[in-house]
Image (tube, rainbow, N blue to C red):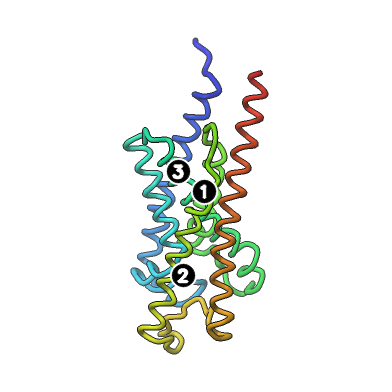
Amino acid sequence: MADISSNDKREYALIIFNVLIVIFVAIGTIVMLNNLDSATGLTSEGIENFKYFTVLSNIFCGIVALLYLIFKIKDKKIHILLKLMAASATGLTFLIIAAFLQPMYPELNLYKGGNLFFHLIVPLLAMCEFVLIKTEKIPFKYTFISAILALIYGTGYCVNILINGKGVWPNTNDWYGFLNWGWPVGLVIFAFIVIMDWMMACLLRFLNKILNRVKTEEKG
């Protein structure tokens, strides 16, 4: 039996990661759409959940994974950029929940229902998969492009409040509560989140570079 090369092993691993991402995003979406426990643990009823960055970034991640599996994207530049955008966006969600929101609100189970997949499983799979991708060099500008997803979301979030008003809980357009301290603080929070998205992309790019360097040295 012919030996399987390290490149083939990595390719098989990437396929498995992408299959799992598609499956878990689908499961998380189905669970989310059937959720009737409104306004608890950063969830709403059914289709209203599509207003959350977590949900949108995970679905984007699932679409990118599905495109990879169907078309086996030939343009490596597009492939790497889309994967970095998906991994950094879902990684941002993972970091905010694990490091900030869950410790701050221990009474809320932010890993319940669809959030188990969107806050934990899919982000971890996406980040691990990106680190495994074999590539010669990832342009540094890709990290800035990756942060655009958070920037677009934050801009839309603010514009919606400016047009429709903040509202009163639970019927509020400020569902994350970022403007509880006023617009200046809210804008600083949004800017920090965009920076965190960029930093996550930088970290993933660095880890990918380190892994590829180690693999190259092992071959040498």
Residue position marked by numbered label 1 in the rendering: 141
Which marked residue is nearer to the observer: mark 1 or mark 3? 1
Q: Which residue is mark 3?
A: 20
Residue 36 image offset from top left, x and y in percent: 39, 73
Give 160 or 141, whichever is nearer the viewer: 141
Q: Secondary structure at mark 2?
A: helix
Q: Give the side of residue 17 with respect to residue 36, left or right.
A: right
Whole-angstrom CA distance, mark 1 to mark 3, is: 29 Å
Quadrant in which residue 108 is drawn: bottom right
Is label 3 in a helix, a strand or a loop? helix
On the picture, is 22 further left or further right than 40?
left
Question: Counting residues from the N terminus, which is met first, the one under dot 1 or under dot 2?
Answer: 1
Quadrant occupied by the C terminus: top right
User: Which of the numbered marks, if any, corresponds to residue 154?
Assistant: 2
**Compared with residue 17, is residue 141 higher up or lower down, i.e. above or below?**
below
Circle number at residue 165? none
Residue kind at label 1, given as amino acid type? Lys
Ranked by sequence position, the earlier of labels 3 and 2 is 3
Asked if marks 1 and 2 touch (Cβ < 8 Å), the reply is no
Q: What is the C-alpha distance between the residues marked 1 and 2?
A: 21 Å
Of helix, strand and loop, which one carries label 1? helix
- Above or below: residue 207 compared with residue 218: below
| Amino acid at the residue labelled 2 | Gly
How many marks the image carries: the answer is: 3
